Image (cartoon, grey):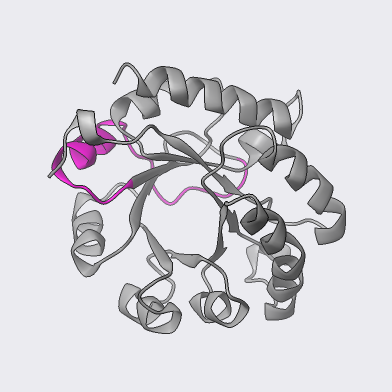
Amino acid sequence: MTDEETREPCRLYLITPPRFEPRAFADTLKMALDAGDVACLQLRLKGENEAPPEADAIRGATEILMPLAQARDVAFLINDRPDLAAELGADGTHIGQTDTSYAEARKLVGPDRIVGVTCHNSRHLAMEAGEAGADYVAFGAFYKTDTKEPISMADPDILTWWSEMFTVPCVAIGGITPDNAAPLVRAGADFLAVSSGVWAHEAGPAAAVRALNRVMIEESNVR
């Protein structure tokens, strides 16, 4: 159990674009990470037609981007591939409901790395993941997104319910931008997972990170 007084302020959880050239993207990433508080960076690559990325593409991107994140005390997570997270020394992994099971992911990365689990809009899936030992549960999508076709749409009430009942952190994901983030922070999100809302922001990624940080600080103080 927890309460509002002991809950930490909401923080930013960055997700990479699905396709990019790692060396070219590195400078953009550095500007974003240096613009404000970022808790973690998830490497989420997609191949053509949403196909799973090649393992070597994940290795190549990790080799370039992970040191930039870790040098700034930003946790580096690899999407869908706990085996590569363990192999490459990442800080953890994020898994969906159709990926590796939580138990297998934990076995692969060990007890000290992060394992987060997508729970869509399901309280049942979230409770299962939390009881199993997940380091966070992710709910969404809260808004329409161009990054991927959402499997489910979630209501902010699920964040309030979770934050009032459980100490395991919750992540809000799906179409989040500086303009629509406030209700999710007020509802109880511990982290806002943002991809195109940062990388495609009209004023640039650094401006988006600054704007999201402002929203999270302001709304965390009033929730």
Residue nearest the viewer, comparing 174 with 26? 26
Dominant SS in magenta: loop
Horizontally, residue 132 falls left or right of residue 67, namely left
Residue nearest the viewer, comparing 104 with 3? 3
Residue occupying image coordinates x 64% and y 69%: 51
| 50 versus 38 height, above or below | below
Q: Is residue 172 magenta?
A: no
Residue occupying image coordinates x 32% and y 16%: 222
- Residue 182 x, y percent position in the rendering: 43, 21
What is the total number of numbered labels drawn onto the structure image? 0
Image quadrant in which the C terminus is located: top left
Does the image show residue 181?
no
Residue occupying image coordinates x 75% and y 45%: 30
Residue nearest the viewer, comparing 68 with 196? 68
- Farthest residue, direction right: 24
Horizontally, residue 71 falls left or right of residue 12, namely right
Horizontally, residue 221 falls left or right of residue 75, namely left
- Residue 99 x, y percent position in the rendering: 44, 72
- Residue 46 x, y percent position in the rendering: 66, 63
| 204 versus 79 height, above or below | above
Residue 165, quarter of the rendered image: top left
The residue range painted magenta reads 146-169
Q: Is residue 157 magenta?
A: yes
Image quadrant in which the N terminus is located: top left
Horizontally, residue 91 falls left or right of residue 187, namely right
Does the image show residue 161?
yes
- Residue 38 x, y percent position in the rendering: 56, 41
